[in-house]
Image: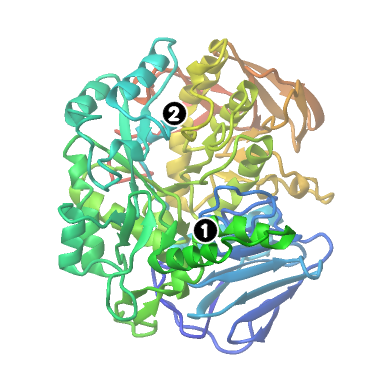
Amino acid sequence: MMKKFSFGAPVYTGAVEADFPAETGDVPFGTLVQKWPLKWEFHLEKHDIVYGLGESVRGMNKRGFRYVSWCSDVPNQHENTPSMYGAHNFLLVFGKKIFGIFFDTASEITFDVGWEDCDRLTVTTEATGADVYFFTADDKGRSPSEQLRGIVKEFRALIGQSYIPPRWAFGLQQSRWGYRTEDDVRAVVKGYRSLGLPLDSVCLDIDYMTDYEDFTVDEKKFPDFSSLNKELSAQGIHLVPIIDAGVKAREGYSVYEEGMRGGYFVTKEDGSVFTAGVWPGKSHFTDFFKDEARAWFGEKYRALTEQGIEGVWNDMNEPAMFYSEESLKSAFERIKAFEGKNLDINTFFEFSDLAGSTFNRRDDYECFYHEIPHRPDGHKASGKIRHDKIHNIYGAWMTRAAWEGLSRISPERRMLIYSRASCIGAHRYGGIWQGDNASTWAHLLMEIKMMPGLNMCGFLYNGADIGGFGGDASRDLVMRWLSFGVFTPLMRNHAAWNTREQECYAFKNPEGFKSILDLRYALIPYLYSEFIKCAVSGEMLMRPLSFDFDDETGRAGGTEDQLMVGEGIMIAPVYTQNARGRLVYLPEDMTMVRWENSMPSCTEMPAGDHYIDIPEEVVVFFIKHGKCVPLARPGLCTKDVSAKEMCLLGTGTEYALYDDDGYTRNIDLTNVSLLKKN
């Protein structure tokens, strides 16, 4: 059951596919302390679990911290980072009362989940208003795990079907900020292929562009981009270029000139075009809320698709800003004021912070405006609205622009799209990656704990940069992260230009990497099938144990380092350095699959706690009782992996496999093959 309440003057965010009338009277759970600015509270019992919030730090259970939905460029994220790249305002309370709550707002919103008061959940927001949706599941004859899944399905039905990428997007993607020429790209492909390591994509960061100008290719570095795409396609490799939100402000650059003529860029209050610095220097930002501007930007992707590109990743779309003209002027004035002074303990640190004081400043987000179109239903705010009041939906609407444009360009074939910034609603248009993480064990564990919340919010196609983006990755960190990445839909190894090379061929003894990658490719029919079934039905692909197992001890709900993947698999990743294995909790009897030297071996395991020996080059996963998982023959790319030659592992007798050509936009779940054990 769902109930909607409306507070303030909400803006249309695009999160919800259909409009519903708002209820009046008391909210069904918690206390509405204040209607506007909105303040809602709920008393938490001692053992209540609070799931959700999508891309956020800390545990699967969000209790004990204060989270702020404010899409942020956070290259130095850590355990105490309150805001990440996404704004995913859905919570699921699991205790004596089981309910979900979604705050549909474009503005900043704060979730105090037992931070100020360990027994109180407090949500506060302001600015543009919010539509608040409460969800409850029918508890008659339904177990707690069934109720949890039921609430998520109802929420997902409200926000719409998750984006489905092409099948090749489930293969390994190798990326690095620093692949500067077509020979660099060829060297990466050769590094993988010469060692028999599977690979499907090479991602291009900003180096491929002409002076960091969107929708351009530097002809000195890539003299024949179309031919390069054809050459790589013959080897089963796709190029995936980056597109940034900021459009370079330069006379003679066609995208800039068209945007100026069409009035497609955001403006300041006086109507002049807003300027801020990003990679190309001074840049303008498309007003994606204008239908004509969004269509214009979406059409620009054709410049890449005409040269053979079938996938893109959108970046810097919070939007990230290094400076504005105003903040840069202010910083120089303040720096000059320190000249000739005796800098003591106080003034030195104030001085040293000034160089970075222009980075993503809040007052810069208050300097420009968007034109929000009037909606036919008439129930949403429209007109000129200052950016900071709708900041959290900007990146999502850039993703929408890409999806709409690529759908027109390629109406029959799915294209790969993923983004850094997002809010709920963007899950219909593309996937996400978790931004600029670091090469640390803590960030590997953070990704493990982040996956269920993202799945709840509809972002099924996601994954973090394997090995970490910033910092130097050790061989064992890359191997353990890769072993977890085997099970995440987006499997991308990505690093910054000034870090150690962390491609799988860059380390000693690459045969261990080959075995791990072979498992990923052997699992592609299962992962692809489960992904599409979950996307269409509203189920979660990756979920906490409590969504599958009920126990009075709370053990399943308290297990935060194991995950369910699809209908049959449970994983227990290793995420500590120098570990020889780990303790694994089995809620029921399961089949343990040990993948070693590109071959599986199976052992039946009783329910309970088990210490499992897991060397770096070995991957262990578990299959639920009564389920089976298909494994295919691995290949060097996804097109080499056939769904016709598979073995079934586990105690089950059959598996319903969904398969298609890997591109069609028409998904028909009645078209499944029932695989049976011999």
**Location of mark 2 (residue):** 172
Corner quadrant of residue 240: top left
Q: Residue at x 31, y 76 (%)?
A: 371
CB atoms of marks 2 and 1 within 8 Å:
no
Q: Is residue 367 placed above or below 213 in the rendered structure?
A: below
Task: List the single residue furthest toward the front.
Answer: 340
Q: Which residue occupies 31% across, 58% down?
A: 283
Q: Nearer the viewer, residue 453 or 644?
A: 453
Q: Classify residue 350 as left or right of residue 194.
A: right
Disc 2 or disc 1, which is closer to the eye? Answer: 1
Residue located at (26% from left, 62% from top): 294
Q: Where residue 310 appears, x then y in whole percent?
A: 27, 38
Q: Position of residue 513 (x, y in %)?
A: 54, 17
The amino acid type found where label 1 is placed reads Ser
Query: In this rendering, does residue 678 appear at all?
Result: no
Decide: is 188 above or below 49.
Answer: above
The amino acid marked with disc number 2 is Leu
Q: CA distance from mark 2 to mark 1?
A: 27 Å
Mark 2 crowdedness (10 Å alpha carbons): few <14, some 14-19, many ≥20: many
**Image quadrant containing the N terminus:** bottom right
The circle drawn on residue 505 is none
Q: Nearer the viewer, residue 374 or 50?
A: 374
Q: How many discs appear?
A: 2
Q: Position of residue 77 (x, y in %)?
A: 61, 49
In the rendered structure, find residue 72 and report the number of the disc placed on it: 1
- Sequence-wise, the earlier of marks 2 and 1 is 1
Residue at (24%, 55%) from the top-left corner?
298
Q: Nearer the viewer, residue 601 or 205?
A: 205
Circle 1: element type: loop
How crowded pointer 1 is (Cα within 10 Å; few <14, some 14-19, many 20+) is rated as many
Q: Does residue 642 show up?
A: yes
* Between 124 and 438, the one nearer to me in the picture: 438
